[in-house]
Image (cartoon, helix red, strand yellow):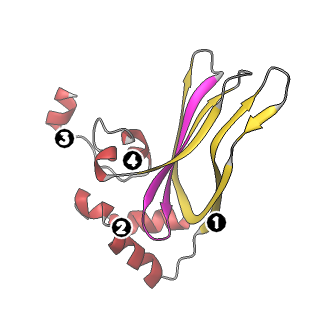
Amino acid sequence: MIQYVLIQTLLAGKPARARFNQNWLSKQFTRRGIKMEKQRLVIGSRTILRSGHVQDNLRPVEFEGELLASHTDFSGDDTRGITESLYRTLDGRLVVYVEDWSRWQGEPTIYRLVAVEDDDFEPGGRFELLGRQAGLVGPLSLDQALNG
C-alpha cells in the first residue's frame, strides 16, 4: 500500500500522458530504493473433468511488482466470470492478469497476462475500469460524459 501512495504522490499534477512514462516512474522507484513484492502467477488453462480429474497446462510466472487494482465481472448465475488484476512491475510496465474462470466441470479456466497500452485506460478502453480504480485516469470531461 505504501508504494501505491507513493505512485499517487509521484503522479500528482502530471498530465495524463506523463502518467504512463514507464522510464520516469522506474527511475523514481530506483532512486527511492523501493523493493516490490515477488508476484507468483500462472498462465495457461485448467479444466476439471466430469470424472474429477484435473487437466492443465499451467506455467508459473514470477516478477517483482505491485497489485494496483482488481475487478471481477460475474456472468450468468455467478458460476462464471472474469477477474482482471492490474500490476505495475519494478521496471514500470503495466500488465493485466486475466482469469477467465468457470466453476462448471468440463469448462476451462484460462489465465493470461496482457501488456497494457495507454489507450487501454482511456474512456471505452478495454481496461478503463482498472485504470480508474488504480487512479491512473482522471475524471471524464463534460463532452466525454455526454457522448459516452
Direction from residue 18 to residue 40 in the image, left or right: right
User: Toward which corner of the image does residue 17 lie, by quadrant?
Assistant: bottom left
Instruction: Name the mark nearer the viewer: 2 or 3.
Output: 2
- Label 2, label 1: how far apart the Cα atoms are: 19 Å
Give the residue at mark 4: 131
Relative placement, left or right, of 107 versus 134 is right
Mark 4 / mark 2, whichever is N-terminal: 2
User: What amino acid type should be assigned to the residue bearing mark 1?
Assistant: Lys
Frontmost of labels 1 and 4 is 1
Residue 142: x %, y % from top left = 16, 36
Tell me how far mark 1 sits from mark 4, CA to CA: 22 Å
Q: Nearer the viewer, residue 109 or 34?
A: 109
Q: Amino acid at mark 3?
A: Ser
The amino acid at mark 2 is Gln
Q: Is residue 3 left or right of residue 129?
A: right
Residue 31 drawn above or below residue 13: below
> Which one is closest to the eye, mark 4 or mark 2?
2
